[in-house]
Amino acid sequence: MMSVEHALKSMLKKFARTRRTKRGNTATHTTESLESRALLTLIGTNAVLSSTFQSIADTDGNEIPFGAVSTATVVDNFTDPEIESFIGQYDIDIDANTIAMSFNLAAGTADPSGIVATGTFYRYYFDFDLSTNESITAVSASANATLQPNVSLSGNTVIVEIAPGMQIGDNFDALINVEVLRSGTVITGRKFHDVNNDGNRDFGESYLNGWTIELKDIDADPLDAPIATTTTRNIDLNGDGSIDPDTESGVYVFSDFPAGTYVVQEVVVDGWSQTLPNHPNAMAAFELDTSLELSSTGSDFLNWGGLNEKWFYSLAGTDSTSAQSATAWYYVTPDGSIYQWDSSPRTALTGTLVAQLAPSFHADPSLIYNAPSPRQYIADVDVSVPTTFRGLDFGNYLAATDFDITLNQETNEATFSWDAAAGATYDIWISDLAAGRQIQFIPNLDGTDIPLTTELLDRRYRVWIRTNSTGASSPWSEPQQFELFRDAVNLITSNRATTIDATPTIEWRPLAGASSYDLRVTNGDTTVYLQNDIAALSHRVANPLQFGVDYRVAVRANFSDGSQTAWDEGLPIRIDGRTTPIVTGNTVTWAAVPAATQYEIWVNRYDNSGVLLQSRVVSQTVIDETSSTLPTLQRGNYAIWIRAIRAEGTQTYNSIWSARTNFFVAAAEQAEDAESPLLQLVSITDVNAKAADSEIAAPLVMPVSREQEGKADDEIETVMAELAASDFLDEA
């Protein structure tokens, strides 16, 4: 079975042969120009400095050596001096394409002012060891320096002459510009940070230094072994002695290689993804080009069919390079859609959609019919024709950091965790949500610092994280919000364990520093009522709660910095109001119901078999009392119910009726005042007990408004009749 390496190598060789047959170089190439020559610098070159002195009076006009011969390799950094100074007379730094000469007050100079005497010359010879196909083509003294010496060129030797009348010494410096020409082929491109991950370099997207670029011979075995590597870096392209980050950063250069077919690719850094030339659109274009063997006649036939389309053709299945042998024609529309033409007329152009790319492929259709290979560029090099391969650019996207947050409310710790990439560092930005300002900035975390735990005060926060890698930073992540609560405080002072008030008022004590309070009523895990930002120390529940249900009510405090206390456990509350009547003689008593404003008593009369004889023998309302005297009743069996009532303006809340209590009236004795007989009532304890155990009870009719009373009374009549018909009553 063919290995992945050999399969890739075979595909690339086939691709390269196709390119040579069809249309030459894969990458764009042009004749050498000043711009491309400027890419060639003195960096890495061996430089030898020697100097001579000539005085007509002292040396009879002959040059004699003075100072030491110095040798140094040109490097692109701030090492100074790169050339050893002779008796402290000068400092010389050769950097990229410039020679900077800084003079001190010369030792041995006859005139301490530094003015070179008449008939005296100082000459400096800079000999550069360039490659055989490189040469220095021009040198010049910068007019912006304080010293402009005479400059000339002999081969690859730059001669700097300080003539009579010129001044050397402190603050009198010279800057020599050097231009280098290469007669061979150059492969060059740039590396950029594709911040928006679209496969194109957009305005403001920076170039990246320090990335490794590899040059591979497609015929080498194994293919993975590069024949040369370089790094992207700053290069002074225009020779002005400074680096413009928009035009002179992220550059790489390959040169001095024999004829052949080469693969140029980058070494992708962990955490980054390549977008150029590996963007999905570019990969789709390459696959289309490879499978269809696309080509162009040199004309796009713009707008032939009236769709502002551009044209190219396929040679798949043929050995021809001529458009006359095209097996199919294709066109791309301004939105990047690629269609295979179906031979429709130009007045009604149609085709089959084969790919959907981006508008940039319409702007430059060569990206389709001369598509670069995925992840690599391929260059066919013919050293007999000096060529510069430009625009072999690489784009990479550094994704925002995806992270998790774990909170410890007991210790006020927030822990951030994510998958760290090798060599990357991370920045964390934490803002106080209420204050709207940064509260912590933690830079340059490496993989050993993750997960990160930080202790924060009780409040709400928003956090972002970004990745730093190879001198660039990813976009900030999507923010995540979290909250560290203050310790829960039991703020409730009103313990309304049972009440008839379905909209009770809850009170609590103040908490120092609190700006407002939240109140919550729950039934198990379900919140049935919530009110936020209460400025007062009490609140009346606005929505009536259900009777007979156990609730818990809790309060938490809010603070101006955005923090809160946690919800405390809360206290129980039940909307009920049932009480039990007790009949003693002709008096009925009951326990008071919290929040009740009055009570309603209901008495029915039954025969010995339990049949209802009369409903509502007694129906009375007692206000703000817990006892009542019953009117005179005939001998017989009776049952009594009681319920609590709360009246609030036009709203009335009625509790559930109490359990049925049975009693028996034995006899009525004649009082001394015959018109005022006393009623003797005997409570039947065993009957009462059966009534309490019975599942038959008065109907649940509260809360109820006065308008509903009539309907409720009818329902109670019916239930009372059913009770009377039951056989559980004892015979009196």
Image (cartoon, rainbow, N blue to C red):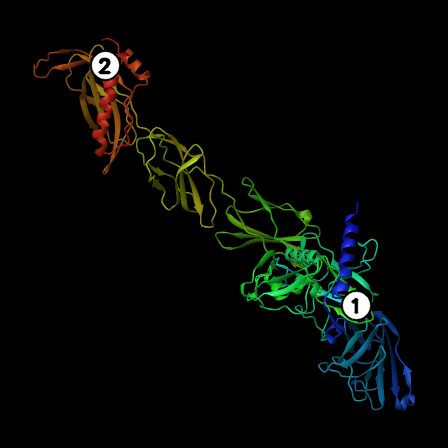
Mark 1 burial class by Cα count in 10 Å: few <14, some 14-19, many 20+: some
Which amino acid type is marked by label 2? Phe
- In the image shown, does 347 or 133 lie closer to the viewer? 347
Residue 200 lies, in percent from the top left, at 63, 62
Residue 100 visible: no
Choose top left, top right, bottom left or bottom right for residue 374. Answer: bottom right
Q: Is residue 505 left or right of residue 216?
A: left
Q: Outermost residue, top direction?
A: 731
| Quadrant holding the C terminus | top left
Residue 297 lies, in percent from the top left, at 68, 68
Which amino acid type is marked by label 1? Val
For residue 663, the mark is 2
Distance CA(mark 2)–CA(mark 1): 115 Å
Q: Is residue 388 above or below residue 354?
A: below
- In the image shown, does 250 or 548 lie closer to the viewer? 250
Q: Is residue 516 left or right of residue 261?
A: left
Q: Earlier in the sequence, mark 2 or mark 1?
A: 1
Total tally of numbered discs in the picture: 2
Residue 144 visible: yes
Q: Is residue 478 left or right of residue 625?
A: right
| Quadrant holding the N terminus | top right
Choose top left, top right, bottom left or bottom right for residue 334. Answer: bottom right
Q: Which residue is mark 1?
A: 75
Q: Is residue 462 above or below residue 526?
A: below
Q: Secondary structure at mark 2?
A: strand
Q: Secondary structure at mark 1?
A: loop
